[in-house]
Amino acid sequence: MRNSREGLAGWLFVAPVVLILGVFLLLPIGMALWVSLTGWNGQGSPFTSDVPFVGADNYTRLFTEDGLARQDFMTSIRNNVYYVAVVVPLQTVLALFLALVVNQRMLKGKGFFRTAFYFPSVTSSVAISVVFLFLFANSGAVNALLAAVGIDGPVWFDDSRGLVHLALGAVGVDSAPAALADGGVLGLSWWDWLSGPSVAMCAIIALVVWTTSGTFMLMFLAALQNLPQQLDEASLIDGANRWQRLRYVTLPLLRPTLFLVLTLGLIGTWQVFDQIYVMSQGNPAKTTLTPAFLSYRTAFRDFEYGSGAAISFVLFLIIVVMTLLQRWILRERRP
Amino acid sequence: MRRLVNTFVGYAILIFFALVFLYPFVIQIANSFKTEPDAAANPLSPVPDPISLAGFERIFEGTNFPLWLGNSLLVTVVITLGRVFLDSLAGYALARLRFRGRRAIFAGVIAVMAVPGVVLLIPKFLVLNQLGIYDSYTALILPVIVDAAGVFIMKQFFESVPVSVEEAARIDGAGVFRTYWSVVLPMARPALITLTILSFQGSWNEFPHTLVAVQNPDLFTLPRGLADLVSGSLGTGTQYPLKLGAALLATIPVALIFVVFQRYFVRGATEGGEK
């Protein structure tokens, strides 16, 4: 008697959550999968026979067919790869560094500094993007700062030049060597693949590193405070210096946290959206276009919902593969 | 001596980074009180010269700011109340009640947490459209009124409550809901506060969901209105004092809550990490 009542209560208690997560998270995935196989343009329902079924066309156009769809998609992938490659290491190292400094026993006022570093993480990404638009504006704070040390700052959000191209330009390679300009893969020339993040993307990278480091710092800090103190003291007695203790004692113990921070970083960086939407809309010259924003733009501005849904499924797959890959790289190795 | 140098270097690093992390906000506040020419000429200066309220006047007279504020308040309050109640209800059932399918549901909740939000934008729009609730307050609220992470936090907490308390209540003849509502929930205050604050902060700042749930400007929340403002619906000029002022007003509620309830934010950040 009691058991059946408890069972009923259990189901009643979880019903709202199950229903809402099911209807607004699981069901939509199935619907979107269907739409990604059609050429639905947003008119009427996507589930009538009027909507053309195109099979895998939306996917093959992203990978194998020459055209704007593939070029834009591959450009967005390139941009995001550079973005991930810069943001993830930077935010992880900065977060770890700040955590190590804030964790020093002899320093006072650590609470204040911890709060200061974390504060940007809790504020609205849209509001912060507005502030950074101003900071990186032509007459903004960053260029004023650069001018103070005699550097003529770029017009950040109009500058589509890639950093690698700029570096090559500095050593005299201004245009693509024929071998790189002519050959290519997946709709972009080798030269385009090797551009590096654009100047405009660097402003977005600065913003994101600035907002995320605080959260990750807290995760490292929590882990650091749980470390057994005797270990550190023992290695101190053994004569290990500061760097050796970090390298051989602290870092190995932080491994689970490091894994967590890297995974969350990888997942987050492939989803960058708000900042792109507010600050650049993928411009200039598509150098801040990312798959997440491209998927949104394709569906809600160009009304090609099938193609947009296909892009988001590919993005989903990328995120899953990245996470698995990272898990494999950082797996516990038995000696 | 060496210790002294170390301490000095430590503080120098901390102060440098505190400036890097806080000075943008100083610039934001200062520039929202500047005139446009002053903001363009002295963007770094923390002192407006002259002090001008023109930006704020324009926010309230020339934009829909009051409307966005009202929408944000409504949506945030409803979502927060909904999450605290529904998440804790489900969390309690998953932690304490024995029923068939419990494990499967918990596994589902964990799986849902792993689905990246941005890839769900088109799917969410499809469902809202099919259900005929696109472009309504329901669309802004209902899909996000529960969240898997909140269920997880509540379940973890309820598992730490000693069973004996509930048994006593049962012997006294309390039903399941009664036991949950008047005995266990009051004990869960710390977890409830954490959840309330995280929900408030999350829904106050939410942007992509509002982008695909509504298109009627009367239903815009603050982040949506702000994004619209920035993308140039005002026409001429850069209008930085106005934009920075609007962004500042949108930040203040979360900033206040953060300053008062800091440790709950911290708990959220580290707990979210330990799934």
Image (cartoon, coloured by chain):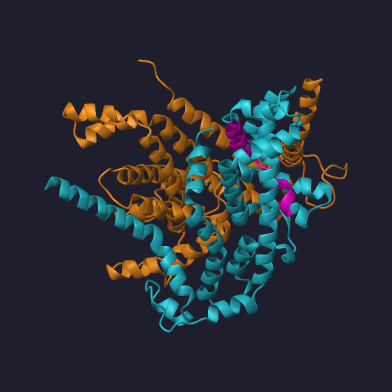
Chain colours: A orange, B cyan
Work out which residue is located at the far top of the displayed protein and give it.
A335
State the image coordinates of residue B60 (x, y, percent, origin top left): 62, 76
Q: Is residue B14 left or right of residue B164?
A: left
Task: Give yes or no for residue B263 being in the magenta stretch.
Answer: no
Magenta residues, as a range? B140-158
State the image coordinates of residue A329 (x, y, percent, origin top left): 43, 27
At x 61%, y 53%, the residue is B200
- Quarter of the figure with residue B233: bottom right
Q: Please give the count of numbered marks on the rendered protein.
A: 0
At x 80%, y 22%, the residue is A4
Work out which residue is located at the far right of the displayed protein and give it.
A49
Decide which of B15, B229 is in the foreground and name it: B15
State the image coordinates of residue B77 (x, y, percent, origin top left): 67, 55
At x 51%, y 45%, the residue is A269
State the image coordinates of residue A175 (x, y, percent, origin top left): 39, 54
Work out which residue is located at the far left of the displayed protein and give it.
B1
Q: Judge whether A214 appears above or below A241 on screen.
A: below
Work out which residue is located at the far front of the displayed protein and give it.
B172
Q: Judge whether B121 appears above or below A166 on screen.
A: above
Decide which of B99, A269 is in the foreground and name it: B99
Q: Is residue B103 left or right of residue A229?
A: right
Decide which of A217, A132 is in the foreground and name it: A217
Could you tell me if residue B116 is visible in this image? yes
Quadrant occupied by the C terminus of chain B: top right
Could you tell me if residue A152 is visible in this image? no
Task: Give yes or no for residue B157 being in the magenta stretch.
Answer: yes
Q: Judge whether A125 appears above or below B65 on screen.
A: above
* Dominant SS type (magenta): helix
At x 52%, y 46%, the residue is A188
